[in-house]
Amino acid sequence: MNIDFITDINKGLEDSLNYKKVDNFIVKILWWHLGVFALVAFLNAVVKLASFYPSPLAWRVISIPEAIVTVLIAAMATLITTLLKGNIQNHYLWRIVVTVAIVIYSYLFVFISGGSIEMHFHFFIVAALLIIFADWRLGWILLVLTALHHGILNYIQPGWVYYYGRNDLSVIAHALPVLAAVIFTTIISINSRETVFNLQEATTRLDNLALKEDLEALRLALDKSALFSATYRKGDIYYANDKFVEVSKYSREELIGQNHRILKSGFHSPEFYKELWDTISSGKVWHGEIKNRAKDGSFYWVNSTLVPIMGPDNKPKRYIAVRIPITEQKESQEQLLKKNQELEKMNKLMVGRELAMAELKKKIKALEQGLKVQDTSDTLPAKES
C-alpha cells in the first residue's frame, strides 16, 4: 500500500467505481441527514423529549437557539456539499469534503443528544458509508476528525456533552473502536479498489487483444486488396505491404528507402504532382487516381488516398498511402471509350454515306425528269409551215 494522502489514487477509475451514481447517492444521504437532524433538534428543543424520560435521542434538553444554530450548521454542510458536486475537478478533494460534511453530522448528533451513546454510533456509520468510495484514506481522515471531536469535548468544553465533566479515559475508549473500524474499512477499501483495478486492467488487456486482432485482420485485408505504404516527410518509403510489392513488381528491399518517384509513369503533368504535394504538405488528405509504372515497364492505375501524420511542429512528419488497384476498370473505360469513338466515326460515315446517297438520288431523279422532257419533245408532230 502506497501511503499517499495528496494525490487522487483512484484517478482513471471513476467510471469503474461508478462515482457519478455514488456522488448522487451521497448527496441524497446528506439531505436525509438534514431532515432527520431537524426532527431530532425539534424533539429535543421544542418537545423537550429528555424531560419526560431518558431517550437514545437525547440525554438533555437543548435550548431553542442551540437547536437553530445546529440546524443551520447542518444545512450549510449539506448545501455546500451539494453545490460542489460535479464542480470540483479533483474528485479526491470532493471525497474529503463529503467526509467532513458527514462527520459534522456526527458532531451535531452527539451535541444535541447530550452525548448519547447511541448517537456515537454515527461515527461507525460514517466509516461504513465511506467504503463506497473505495478510498482507504477517508477512514483515517475520519479517525483524525473523531479524535479532534472527543479532544474538544473532553479538554476544552466537557460541559457540552459529558455531564460528568472531563474524563481522559473516554477519549481512548471512543478512539479504539473507531480505530478498529477504520482498520477494517481500510482493508475492505483496498481490496475493493484492487479488485476494480484488476478488472479494469483485464478489460483493457482484452480490448487491446481484440484491437490487435482487428488490426491484424485489417492488415491482412489491406495486403489482399490494397497497396499500402508509409513514407517519411521527404517521400522516402520505409514500409510497403505485400500487395504493393506484387503490383509494382519491385521487391520490398528495392522499395524501402526509395522515393515514390521511381513509380512515375510520365502520364501526369508536373502541375498534377505539385497540387498533390501542396495538399498533403499543408496537412490535408489528398485523393485521386494515379497511373504508375511497374519495374517491368508495364503501367498500372491506382485510386490513391494520401494521409499526412502531423508532428509536434504542426507539420507532416510521415505520410500513409492506401492505393486501390483500378487498372482493369481503367482499361475497360479506355476500351469503352475507344469503341464509342469508333461507333461515332462509323455513325459519321453512315450519315455521310446517307447524305451522299440522298444527293445521288436527287441527281438521278433530276436526270430522269430531264430525259422524260426530251422524249416528249421528240415525239411531238412538227408544225406545218
Image (tube, helix red, strand yellow):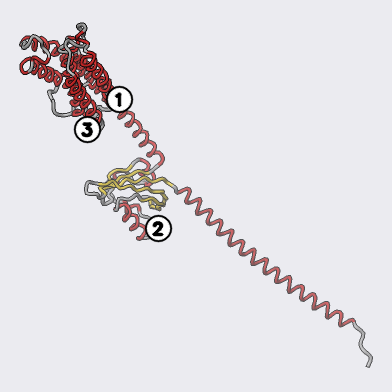
Q: Residues within 10 Å of mark 1 (few under 14, many from 20)?
A: few
Looking at the image, residue 193 sits to the left or right of residue 295; the answer is: left
Residue 349 or residue 213, whichever sits in front: 213
User: Callout 2, which amino acid?
Assistant: Phe
Callout 3–callout 1 Cβ contact below 8 Å: no
Where is 158 relative to 246, above or below? above
Question: x, y percentage for residue 55?
Answer: 21, 8
Q: Residues within 10 Å of mark 2 (few under 14, many from 20)?
A: few
Label 2, label 1: how far apart the Cα atoms are: 64 Å
- On the image, the x and y values in percent for residue 163 come to 10, 10
In this view of the protein, can residue 263 be seen by the observer?
yes
Toward which corner of the image does residue 273 lie, by quadrant? Answer: bottom left
- Mark 3 and mark 2 lie on one chain; the one further toward the N terminus is 3
Q: Which mark is residue 163?
A: none
- Residue at 39 percent across and 42 percent down: it is 226
Gap between marks 3 and 2 measured at Cα:
62 Å
**Location of residue 172 (image quadrant):** top left
Q: Give the left or right position of residue 370, taking residue 169 as reference.
A: right
Between marks 3 and 2 in the image, the one whose residue lies nearer the viewer: 3
Q: Which residue is mark 3?
A: 88
The label number, if any, that marks residue 21 in the structure image: 1
In the picture of the structure, the residue carrying the numbered disc 2 is 267
- In front of the other: 155 or 278: 155
Q: Amino acid at mark 1?
A: Lys
Q: Are marks 3 and 2 in contact (CB under 8 Å)?
A: no
On the question of residue 254 being in view, the answer is: no
Vertical position of residue 337 compared to residue 78: above or below: below
